[in-house]
Image (cartoon, rainbow, N blue to C red):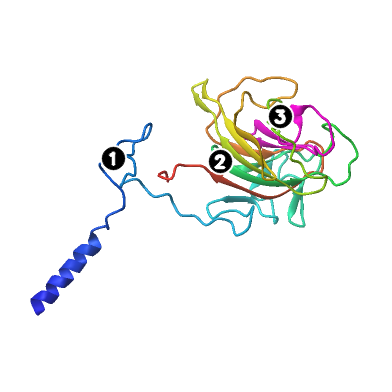
């Protein structure tokens, strides 16, 4: 009996040291353009995260840039910056300058909520104007485009100066708007651009751009050439002289499931 007990203990210890067999196969063909076989038994599992509890809430792997309390994740070229924070939002203070993140980002998922001033006093580009400047040079326009004619590649949700949005999905002045942005950073070899940046933009749940190719850095009334830059750069929120409000800003760095 003692020998049987010892054998049982040894078998149990061996079983604990041997990882359980994973579902999948090792006799299937390779997937084109991948290093894995179809249903590969050894393919790493996607990491587990917890989604936000409510629509628009940050998931567990997000970097929260602004949660309504302070702008500690941002800085300004004018020192600490002069944007106002109150009632859960940050408001552009005209002439205080743009604010940009202390951290740098490349490929990312970005969530931003914004609101133009409720009181309309002007029109065209002089109405609730700001911008989400990805890497400080690829701009998704923020503008009050409710019953406000302007040039098509400058209205809300446009890739400024390049692509008009598929539709105008803007809400009324003063109402909160949502941008969900998927951005693929450009790639350079030395000074040569070898892959353009791409962006997908969803405005208030409506698709505006689907993996749209960005053809140049942002410019007004011009087309600028690409210039090589680091793989990650800060995200910038523009001061265009209007009291636009921002809230609930978070970002996720996009990496493959098998990357750390």
Mark nearest the camera among 1 and 3 is 1
Q: Which residue is mark 1?
A: 28
Q: Is residue 70 located in the magenta-colored stretch of the structure?
A: no
**Cα distance between the residues tagged 1 and 3:** 45 Å
- Element type at mark 2: strand
- Say above or below: 151 vs 147: above
Residue 99's spot in the image, x, y percent? 70, 41
Q: Which residue is mark 3?
A: 164
The quadrant in which the N terminus is found is: bottom left
Residue 204's spot in the image, x, y percent? 70, 45
Within 10 angstroms of label 3, few (less than 14), some, or many (20 or more) residues?
many
Q: Is there CB contact under 8 Å for labels 3 and 2? A: no
* Residue 229, quarter of the rendered image: top right
- Say above or below: 210 vs 177: above
Q: Residue at x 82, y 45 (%)?
A: 172
Q: Residue at x 30, y 53 (%)?
A: 22
* Residue 108, quarter of the rendered image: top right
Mark nearest the camera among 3 and 2 is 3
Q: Which residue is mark 2?
A: 108
Q: Is there CB contact under 8 Å for labels 1 and 3? A: no
* Residue 167, quarter of the rendered image: top right
Is residue 126 found left or right of 50 in the rendered image? right
Q: Is residue 136 located in the magenta-colored stretch of the structure?
A: yes
Task: Tell me where the magenta segment starts and ends, as one range.
Answer: 129-157
């Amino acid at each position: 009996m003692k020998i049987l007990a010892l054998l049982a203990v040894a078998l149990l210890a061996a079983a604990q040291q041997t990882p359980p067999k994973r579902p999948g196969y090792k006799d299937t063909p390779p997937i084109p353009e991948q290093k894995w076989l179809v249903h590969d038994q050894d393919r790493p599992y996607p990491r587990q995260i917890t989604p936000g509890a409510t629509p628009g809430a940050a998931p567990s792997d997000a970097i929260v840039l602004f949660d309504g309390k302070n702008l500690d994740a941002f800085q300004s070229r004018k020192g600490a910056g002069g944007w106002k924070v109150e009632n859960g939002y940050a408001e552009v203070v005209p002439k205080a300058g743009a604010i940009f993140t202390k951290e740098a980002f490349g490929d990312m998922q970005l969530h931003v909520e914004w609101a133009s001033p409720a009181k309309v006093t002007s029109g065209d580009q002089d109405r609730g104007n700001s911008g989400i400047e990805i890497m400080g040079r690829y701009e998704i326009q923020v503008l009050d485009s409710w019953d406000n004619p302007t040039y098509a590649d400058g209205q809300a949700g446009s890739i400024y100066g390049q692509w008009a949005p598929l539709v105008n999905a803007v809400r009324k002045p003063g109402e909160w708007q949502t941008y969900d942005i998927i951005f693929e950073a450009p790639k350079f070899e030395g000074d040569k651009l070898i892959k353009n940046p791409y962006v997908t933009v969803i405005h208030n749940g409506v698709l505006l751009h689907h993996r749209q190719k960005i053809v140049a850095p942002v410019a007004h009334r011009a087309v600028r050439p690409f210039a090589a830059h680091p793989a990650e750069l800060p995200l910038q929120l523009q001061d265009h002289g209007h009291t636009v409000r921002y809230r609930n800003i978070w970002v996720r760095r996009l990496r493959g499931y098998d990357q750390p």
